[in-house]
Image: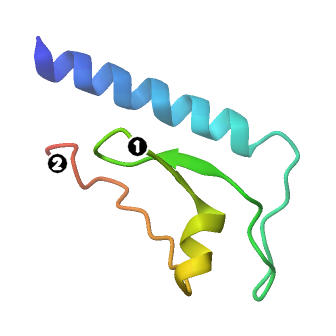
Amino acid sequence: MRRTQRFFCGGLVGLVAVLILATGSAALEVGQKAPEFTLAAPDGKQVKLGDLLAKGPVVIYTFIQAFTGT
């Protein structure tokens, strides 16, 4: 049951991400600055890109199937 819920939630989050990314926004070119955004950290606190950039360079990396059990 729990695995099914995680699968469903993961699929729902993926679908929402695809819909958001497909809404006419263009990909960034090399050297172009990313727009300001805020995400939730694993502990639930909000993290802003601007706050991280104030400390130094930032690398954004995604783990596509890191926690899917595959």
Count of numbered marks = 2
Element type where label 1 sits in the image: loop
- At x 24%, y 25%, the residue is 6
Q: What residue type is labelled 2?
A: Thr
State left or right for residue 9 relative to residue 36.
Answer: left
Q: Which of marks 2 and 1 is nearer the N terminus?
A: 1
Q: In which quarter of the image is residue 34?
A: bottom right
Tell me, yes or no, whether the two marked residues, 2 and 1, touch with CB atoms within 8 Å: no
Q: Which of 33 and 66 is in front in this view?
A: 33
Q: Which amino acid does label 1 sit on?
A: Lys
Name the residue at 63% across, 39% down.
18
Q: Position of residue 69 (x, y in %)?
A: 14, 44
Q: Quadrant of residue 57?
A: bottom right
Marks 2 and 1, how far apart in space? 28 Å
Q: As drawn, is 42 to the left or to the right of 46?
A: left
Q: Is mark 2 on a helix, strand or loop?
A: loop
Foreground residue among 9 and 34: 34
Within 10 Å of disc 1 (Cα), the crowding (few <14, some 14-19, many 20+) is few
Give the number of the mark in front: 2 or 1: 1
| Camera-side residue of 58 and 7 | 58
The location of residue 44, given as percent across then percent down, is 35, 38
Q: Which mark is residue 12?
A: none
**Which residue occupies 69% across, 33% down?**
19
State whether residue 19 is above or below residue 63: above
**Residue 1 image position (x, y, % from top left):** 11, 11
Badge 2: residue crowd in 10 Å (few <14, some 14–19, many ≥20): few
The residue wearing badge 1 is 45
In the image, residue 22 above or below residue 29: above
Question: Dot 2 corresponds to which residue?
Answer: 70
Whether 36 is drawn above or below 69: the answer is: below
